[in-house]
Image: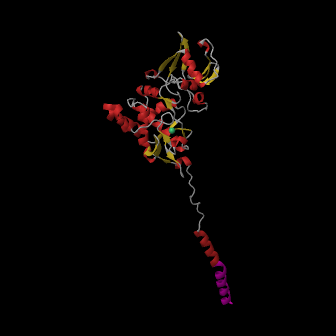
Amino acid sequence: MKKFILLCIALWVIIFAVPSFMSRKIWNEVPELPLPIVADDKTEEESAVQLADNDVTVTLNYNGEIKNIPLGEYLEGVVASEMPALFPDEALKAQAVAARTYTMKKIAAPPAEEHNGAAVCNNPSHCKGYEPISAFASNWNTATEEYTKKIRRSVAETDGEILLYEGEPITAVFHSTSSGKTENAADVWGGNVPYLVSVDSYGEEASPRFEEKKTFDPEEFKKIFLNKYQNAAFDPNPENWVTDISRSEAGGVKTLKVGKVQLKGSELRTLYNLNSTNFTIYYISGKLEITCRGYGHGVGMSQYGARAMALDGKNYREILAAYYTGTELGKISQKPNQ
Ligand SMILES: [Zn+2]
C-alpha cells in the first residue's frame, strides 16, 4: 500500500508538478519588458540635417552656359555684383544672407524656362547679378585685395544662414535705395507678403540715385505714351494730362491716368525709364518734369538703408530684422529623404 501511495505521488509529480513548475519558469524567464524603441520620435525639423554653404551646389546659367559651382563661391560673386564692396561689413553680411536665402528658394522651386534647367541665371533683372569675384579686380584696382577679403568674409561669417518666416525660407528681395520708406509687396506686385511690408528706412540721401529729375518736351512725352497706348486722348492743356494718382503707404504711384488711360505706376516707370515708382509729374515752364525718389522696386531690404544702419553700429541681424518683418535667422537644412 505504501508503495502504491509513493507511486501515486511520483506520478502526480511527473504529470502535474513538473510541467506546472517548468511552464511557470518559462513564463518567468520572459518578463514583460517595455516595447523596444523602434519609432523615431523626433519631429521632422529636429531630424533635418543642417548644411554649410559648401554642401550645396548651385546650377547657374551663366550667359547661356550651364555651370555647377559651390554655393559659397556663387554667393561671393553675387554679393560683389549686387553691393558696392566699399560698403560696411555688416551691410555686406546682410546682403550675403539675403542672397543666400533668395538662392535657396530658387533651388527649391522648379527652374524657370529661360534657365535651360539651371536653378538661377546671372541676369540681374531676372535673378541676381553674378560674376566670379576675380572679374572685379579691374574695377577695384589697388583695393582688390581688401575688397576680395571683405566679400569673402561676408559669406564665410554668415555660412549657411538664411531668413525664415514660419520655418520656411523667405523671398528675400532687395533694392538699391528707398524713398525713405520701403514699399509693401502688395502695393507693388499685388500679393500680400507678411514679411515684405513698408518700414521706415533712413540714410537714403547718401545714395547717388536718391533723387532723379527728368524733363520732357510735352510733344515728346505724348509721343512716347501714344507709342504704347494708342487710345490715349490728350487734352490741349498738358496740365490736365496726368490725373487720378493713387499712392502706396510709402508714396509710390500704384495707379494713375495719363491721357485718360489708366495704368500702373510701374508701367509708367518702365515707359519713361524712371528710377522708381515714387514719382511726381509737374508741368512747369512749358515742360513736363518728372521727379523721382529712390532706385528700384522699393520692396524688402534697401541696400543704402542697410549701409546707414551698419555705419550706425547695427549688425547684420538687426539690419535683416528691420527690413524683413517677423522673420528669423536659421540655417539651410535638408529634411530626411530629400
Ligand atoms: Zn534667372
Residue 300: where, in percent of width, then height? Answer: 52, 30
Query: Which corner quadrant holds the N terminus?
Result: bottom right
**Prevailing secondary structure class for the magenta stretch in the rendered image:** helix
Question: Magenta span covers which residues?
Answer: 1-17
Considering every residue shown, the one lying at the far left of the view is 142
Residue 230: where, in percent of width, then height? Answer: 62, 23
Residue 65: where, in percent of width, then height? Answer: 45, 43
In the visual, does 226 lie left or right of 86? Answer: right
From what the image shows, is residue 336 above or below residue 126? below
User: Does the magenta portion include 14?
Assistant: yes
State the count of labels.
0
Q: Residue at x 42, y 34 (%)?
A: 81
From what the image shows, is residue 66 above or below residue 239? below
Q: Residue at x 61, y 11 (%)?
A: 237
In the picture, residue 40 is in which quadrant? Answer: bottom right
Q: Residue at x 63, y 14 (%)?
A: 235
User: Does the magenta portion include 247?
Assistant: no
In the visual, does 66 lie left or right of 140? Answer: right
Examine the rendering and report whether any part of residue 248 can be seen. Answer: no
Considering every residue shown, the one lying at the far top of the view is 285
The foreground one among 245 and 44 is 245
The foreground one among 8 and 157 is 157
The foreground one among 227 and 56 is 227
